[in-house]
Image: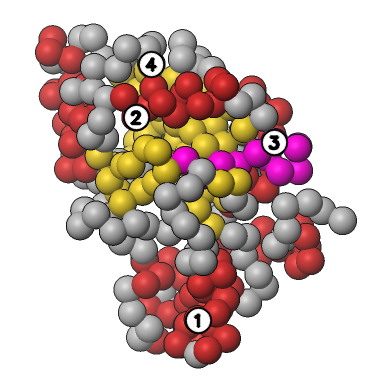
Amino acid sequence: MDLSIIVLNYKTKAFLRQYIKGVFEQNWNFNFEVIIVDNNSNDGSVEMLKEEFLNNQKYESLNLKLIESNKNTGHSIGNNIGIEKASGRYVLISNTDIIYFNPNDMKKMLDYMNNHQDIAVLGPKLKNADGSIQDNCLRFYKFSTILNRRSFFSKTPWGKKDLERFSMHDFDHQKIKDVDWIMGAQQLIRKDFLEAAGNLDDRFFLYFADTDICKQAWLKNKRVVYYPDVNIIHYHKRESAKSLRLKDIFGYTTRLHIKDWRRYIKKYGIKNSSTRKNN
């Protein structure tokens, strides 16, 4: 098996339907499987999958598997459930709000990984629906970056400077480049590296698992590469950018972000958390 696509679903029924149809229409000329882990959505996603895809002869050629979780396990554990069942040489961790347009794109990414054995994680260029480029390749967080992202400090000169550094706004996003980490909406990862790393760190509930697996790659002398020769649409709406109202600053997703950030700092320490190598 060449590729295992892991799709973690939590209450994204419409996106999930669109995603599976999109993959089916690609007619990829390599062996792949799609493993969907439903994180106890209770929004009709499971019923939709069974009725429209798993029991539909039209999609018999699509190697589609469904795993139902009895609770919302979060990002890391949910994806790990799928990774444990994956049989591909490569694992693609993918959000449901992704659209593939060019059938050759995924093959190009696989070929690039095959030709560069030192790469552990590869990420494509992600675009918004209007064609603008998303901040998909990023630098590691500094200690103050969370605060600058989640509060009015983002409007200050020093906050803006840190966020521009974090988001790599000084970088030409048309060039292939080694980067600190790739956003988890679309990460192509070598399966043997995942096994060596112990899969995603299940201490991270929603955030930092994507950061952490890239940090692990660098610590194991593997590369993390941004690959803009492939363009993929991602209907991404960053929760931390909704507003700077107090109810949002101290809202649920902010609390999760800070909790996972504290776990990340505890794992690496303040000094080592922002570098590719530990001292």
Read off the residue under disc 4: 32
Q: Mark 1 and mark 2: span between their CA atoms?
A: 34 Å
- The magenta stretch is 217-227
The three-letter amino acid code for the residue at tag 2 is Asp
Tag 2's secondary structure? helix
Q: Mark 1 and mark 3: span between their CA atoms?
A: 31 Å
Tag 4's secondary structure? strand
Q: Is residue 52 left or right of residue 258?
A: left
Kindly identify the residue that appears in the image at 62 percent across and 60 percent down: 140
Read off the residue under disc 3: 222
Sequence order check, earlier mark of 1 and 2: 2
Going by the picture, which residue comes out furthest to the bottom?
156
Read off the residue under disc 1: 160
The three-letter amino acid code for the residue at tag 4 is Phe
Percent coordinates x, y for residue 206 in the rendering: 49, 54
Instruction: Indicate whether 47 appears above or below 234.
Output: above
Sequence order check, earlier mark of 4 and 2: 4
Q: Which mark is residue 105?
A: 2
Sequence order check, earlier mark of 4 and 1: 4
For disc 3, the neighbor class at 10 Å (few under 14, some 14 to 19, many from 20) is some
